[in-house]
Image (cartoon, rainbow, N blue to C red):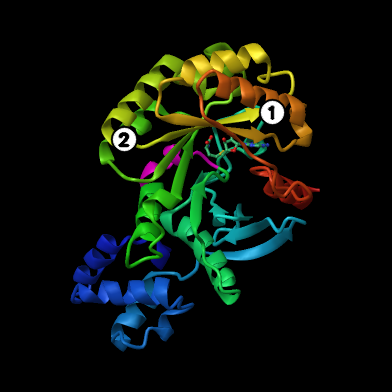
Amino acid sequence: MKSIYDLTLPQMEEMMAEHGQKSYRAKQIYSWLYRKKAVSFEEMTDLPASLIEQLKNEYEFLPLRLLEKQVARDLTAKYLFELSDGMTIETVLMHFNFGKSVCVSSQVGCNMGCTFCASGLLKKQRDLTAGEMTAQIMYIQRELEQEGYRVDNVVVMGTGEPFDNYDNVMDFCKTINSDHGLAIGARHITISTCGIVPKIRAFAQEHLQYNLAISLHAPNDELRRQLMPVAHAYPMDELMKALDDYSVENHRRLTFEYILLKGVNDSDAQAVELADLIRGKNAYVNLIPYNEVDENGYHTTDDRTALHFYDILMKHGVKATLRTKHGEDIDAACGQLRARHERADKS
Ligand code: SAH
């Protein structure tokens, strides 16, 4: 059954028309969902009883429920949700000085197979619907509101490849961005992709203001192919060409994500090679400390080497940030909590 959160406002208006209702009803429902945070159709008291009845028969409400929540010492919180079909997904809430950020999952599992990532331990089972992504935000928004906060930023960086679930991710972003939805500014929404070139090109043509982040993790094809199988399908020069075209179309600054893996991609020479690749682009590099995953043998670069890598980028004319770790004492790496949960289930 579809969730009511699956519908963008235009889709809701269309649905109202199909039910012989005036289109303003769609905004009323939207307001119940996203302003008043209703938890059932019955609460929508300004709708005709017959419409409420129809909605109840045709749509489910919140399509997920909380199974487990872990809170780290730095208050980073990880939520394990169960979907209506029993599958599980993870969502992370991070508290930054610039606001509350929620990292949503876009698929159940992931097929991209990045060798360092825990998400790929469990292959993709299915795409998430727009409503299942929106519901992750709504659950946390409700919690935050009780403490006087709200979700300020959304990053589509949880489990899954958003550009392998393009339409649903776009609908989700549209809903949370809508003035009638959660009204989260487009510049506060970030989509992170491993580099699916045709979808980067499609996204560029839509001229949306969401931030685009690219998981790069290597300065050349040879190493990138070892870390990220997607690089076989979309080599570096095609990726960079698509991103240059995106920049021409959109005038938006790109983010390159680069996880520092000890002895793998963190040498001085690789820093120089990375700088040569990025210099001149309207972009910066986000250096990410690696959250170690037991299963795969990669290790985190030590702080001194990380800082040195950062310095080389800056000296070679590339802007970079060196992120600090969050949620180190919980299973915060993409897919970790879920992988542990599924293993426990099977044993
Ligand atoms: N598929 C998308 C979004 C999900 S991954 C993408 O590839 O961008 C989100 C980010 O987390 C990516 O940059 C990914 O490489 C990174 N990541 C995955 N596992 C990690 C780990 N164990 N530690 C730190 N970052 C990780």
- The one nearer the camera, 177 or 18, is 177
As drawn, 1 above or below 231: below
* Circle 2 SS class: loop
Q: Nearer the viewer, residue 322 or 292?
A: 322
**Amino acid found under the numbered disc labelled 2:** His
- Residue drawn at point x = 36 percent, y = 20 percent: 241
Tell me which corner region of the image, top left, top right, bottom left or bottom right, holds residue 118: top right
Q: Quadrant of residue 313?
A: top right
**Left or right, 230 with reference to 269:** left
Span shown in magenta: 160-167
**Residue at the image point whose x is 49% and y is 53% from the top:** 154
Q: Of the residues shown, which amino acid type is indicated by label 1?
A: Leu
Quarter the N terminus occupies: bottom left
Q: Position of residue 260 (x, y in %)?
A: 67, 28
Query: How far across and how far down the image is residue 170, in percent?
Result: 36, 48
Q: Residue furthest front?
A: 315
Q: Which residue is mark 1?
A: 307
Say the numbered circle drawn on residue 251. 2
Q: What residue do we see at 68% from left, 49% from top?
A: 338
The answer to whether residue 180 shows anywhere in this view is yes
- Residue 311 x/y as whole percent: 63, 24
Query: Which quadrant contains ligand 1?
Result: top right
What is the crowding at mark 2: few (fewer than 14 residues within 10 Å), some, or many (at least 20)? few
> Could you give the CA–CA distance between mark 2 and mark 1, rounded to whole angstroms?
29 Å
Of circles 2 and 1, the one toward us is 1
Query: Which label was assigned to residue 164?
Result: none
